[in-house]
Image (cartoon, rainbow, N blue to C red):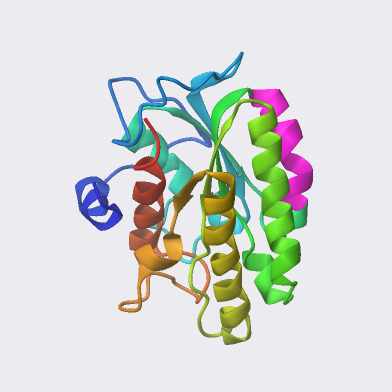
Amino acid sequence: MGALRKFFSFALIGAVPLVVSCLGSGGGGGPSYSSHDFGDNDPKKVVALGDSITEGYSCDDETRAYPDRVAQMTGLTVINAGSGGEQSSGAASRAGRLMDKHKPGFILILTGHNDAIFDRSPGSVRGNIRSIIQSAQNRKVVPIVGTLLPIGAPRRFATEPAKSYSVEIRSLAKEMGVQLVDIEKEFGDGKSLECDGLHPNEEGSAVIAAAFADKLP
């Protein structure tokens, strides 16, 4: 099911706690991962790693963090490990500890927006995300990596860096054989899905969640 279609199916979902465990059959509609060796990790647990977009910074009262929505859509336990203001280097430094603590079957990776604001090199962002993916694979955790949200006014100075990171992320996902969620393409060039040029509005949050949910069992 496409992200926009799934958004309309789940647009009225209520708010949920930071760590969400949903009962019922759930199901994200993605691969079954039946042949994957999860080791001692819990295939029904997900860590969402990222910055304030993951944490749930909102410009209005309606917007809910996308990890909460993923839990509702899939029936999986989703741990929101977003950290506002963090760059991809910080996410890379935290990833291993988070996976060791929570033993998730999956890790959702959405980072790089703050790197774009500081114009970090595409190579450094690629290297940090590579490190997160490798850390996950070493622990038998399935990594699912997202491209960046398009960045617009009043932060247009970060638009091109963000685009260049998304190019690198697509290439890296292909190189390492990991699941890619192309958030940049899901948002498209039409109506803005951000409330301040960076953070998703209600519709944008739902689109991100649906895109990630499509890659989960």
Q: Quadrant of residue 116?
A: bottom right
Q: Residue at x 62, y 66 (%)?
A: 113
Residue 108: x and y in percent read 54, 43
Residue 64: x and y in percent read 43, 51
Residue 21: x and y in percent read 44, 25
Segment colored magenta: 90-102
64 and 147: which one is in front? 147
Q: Quadrant of residue 114?
A: bottom right
Quadrant in which the C terminus appears: top left
126 on left or right of 39: right
The reply to whether residue 56 is visible in this rendering is: no
What residue occupies the far top of the structure in this picture? 40
73 on left or right of 155: left
Tell me the chief SS of the magenta region. helix
Q: Is residue 216 above or below residue 165?
A: above
Q: Residue at x 30, y 27 (%)?
A: 26
Q: Is residue 29 above or below residue 41?
A: below
195 on left or right of 104: left
Q: Residue at x 40, y 56 (%)?
A: 205
Residue 65 among magenta residues? no
What residue occupies the far front of the structure in this picture? 175
The reply to whether residue 7 is visible in this rendering is: yes
